[in-house]
Amino acid sequence: MQTLVPLERTLTELDHTRLTHLLRGNGASPQEAGIAALSAALDAADIVPSRAVAPDVVTMYSRAELEDPGTGRRQVLTVCYPEDAEPAAGFVSVLSPVGAGLLGLRVGMQAQWHTPGGRAAQAQVRALLFQPEASGDFTL
């Protein structure tokens, strides 16, 4: 499997703490693509206070509009915790490859992940339609 290029990411202190605890308590294999990607993102991210995160950064429960660079197809996804995931409704777990690929990116950046079949995929973050911190919710 080809290694994806690491991207610069920003995480809030609260998201970083909660996700670190989630990974420690998750019984899933660290070899699973989403878990490995999230672990790498946590290790390499710039950590900022929730009140200081830029409004164009994908945080937990942010609703992002994505565009496939090959087809131009757009979709809206919300990055959430595993218990709230409903992929058919656009809620993707942060432990999934696409959820881990989006977390911490800024509008304009390309999210990269591997599909369950091992194929490299990507999408550009076109807009943030909702970010909890930007709307004053620093505990979501």
Image (spheres, rainbow, N blue to C red):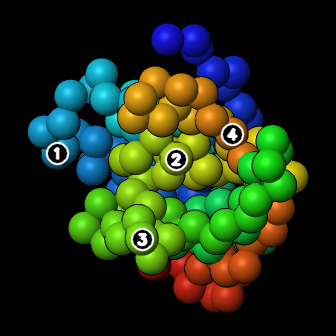
The answer to the question of whether label 2 and label 4 lie on touching residues, with beta carbons closer than 8 A, is: no
Give coordinates of residue 90: x percent, y percent.
50, 71
Look at the image and tell me in which quarter the C terminus lies: bottom left
The answer to the question of whether label 4 and label 3 lie on touching residues, with beta carbons closer than 8 A, is: no
Q: How far separated are the C-alphas under marks 1 and 2? A: 21 Å
Q: Earlier in the sequence, mark 4 or mark 1?
A: 1
Q: Quadrant of residue 84?
A: bottom left
Q: Earlier in the sequence, mark 2 or mark 4?
A: 2
Q: Residue furthest front?
A: 71
Q: Earlier in the sequence, mark 1 or mark 3?
A: 1
Q: Quadrant of residue 89?
A: bottom left
Q: How far separated are the C-alphas under marks 4 and 3? A: 19 Å
Q: Nearer the viewer, residue 46 or 80?
A: 80
For residue 88, which numbered disc appears in the image? 3
* Label 1: element kind: helix
For residue 25, which numbered disc appears in the image? 1
Q: How far separated are the C-alphas under marks 4 and 1? A: 29 Å
Q: How far separated are the C-alphas under marks 2 and 4? A: 9 Å
Q: Earlier in the sequence, mark 2 or mark 3?
A: 3
Give coordinates of residue 61: x percent, y percent.
51, 72
Which amino acid type corresponds to the residue marked 1 in the rendered image? Gly
Q: Nearer the viewer, residue 121 or 51?
A: 121
Q: Which residue is mark 2?
A: 98
**Eyeballing the image, is 138 above or below 15?**
below
